[in-house]
Image (cartoon, rainbow, N blue to C red):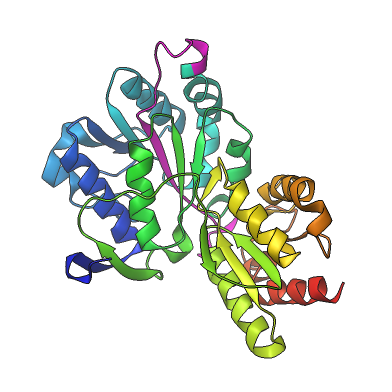
Amino acid sequence: MNQATTTRMNLLQAVNSGLDNAMAANDKVICLGEDIGKFGGVFRATSNLQEKYGKPRCFNTPLTEQGIVGFAVGLAAQGSVAVAEIQFADYIFPAFDQIVNEAAKFRYRSGNEFNCGGLTIRAPYGGGIDGGLYHSQSPEAYFCHTPGLKVVIPSNPYQAKGLLLAAIREPDPVIFFEPKAIYRASVSQVPEQDYELPLGVAEVVQQGTDITLLGWGAQMVQIVKAAEKAAVDDGISCEVIDLCTLLPWDRETVSTSVCKTGRLLISHEAPLTGGFAGEIAATIQEQCFLNLEAPISRVAGLDTPFPLIQEKQYLPDYLKIYEAIKSSLAF
């Protein structure tokens, strides 16, 4: 990365920079959502975009998620590149039918004669902000069950900008979940210019030999911290993988790692039952069964609504991951 062309950005600023680049490069890119215009959205992700590109290209919508996504599907179907913001991922459920029954099936039902590929739905997701049960959920698994969609979750500013630009230009609709807990906490050097990172490709954050640790989004902070503790306290060498894209997910990178280490631990904030870790575990045991030295571990949120005052007990933190690492090595 050329340091002369980079700027220190947090994850939120990287998202804003990506939207700015996309709108500058293509006048068909349109941003829409609740309070995203002059106000810049609840997290200010779209700050200054309306001033720069005008109200027709960055505008407020009524407070109706079904309407936001339905309108965005229509925009994309007629040739615009729609980037719709859902204020919190928890609010995406009123738009569920529009996403899984309309956007995801648009191309298939026409035999590729028409589509709404120019559609990206951005949504801040996850816990860590004391938001309680309506502002803290991680609904990625619901959408990973739907053919026709792509589901992307960055974990740092560099990924956020590169993956967002790739998502906006992707010919299939993309759900882009942004880990709001680290919107301002995750900071790194990010190119000011336009760049893309490939969808469907995981990032090997750290090489290791004893166990593979897999996650996405803000959970990567906890996973890396657990890997550091395991190395310092117990001499355990952890390979750390950031999945980045959940649909389609990078089976090859994960299976190659597990065949090397013989162990796999997957961690996500969403509840354990029906969480995407289960799908990964099923696939890896099929592909790597003879290489596994221990059962695949899952460290996840609890099977309860997301609590408020018990958030720290609910979330899978680095200590829970660390204990699971030791249990796997002791098996």
* Residue positioned 66% across, 78% down in the render: 237
For the residue pair 301 and 265, the one nearer the viewer reads as 265
Judge whether residue 290 can be spotted in this image: yes
Give above or below for 82 relative to 52: above
Where residue 230 appears, x then y in whole percent? 67, 82
Q: Quadrant of residue 126?
A: bottom right
| Residue 187, placed above or below residue 94 | below
Residue 330: quarter of image: bottom right
Q: Does 128 lie within the magenta span? A: yes
Q: Is residue 38 visible?
A: no
Q: Residue 204 appears at what percent x and percent y? A: 53, 63
Q: Position of residue 22 (x, y in %)?
A: 24, 42
- Which quarter of the rendered picture does the C terminus lie within? bottom right
Residue 314: image location, x then y, percent: 68, 64
Q: Residue furthest bottom?
A: 233
Residue plotted at (60% across, 59% down) = 215
Tell me if residue 286 is in the magenta stretch.
no
Q: Which contiguous range is marked in magenta?
A: 108-133
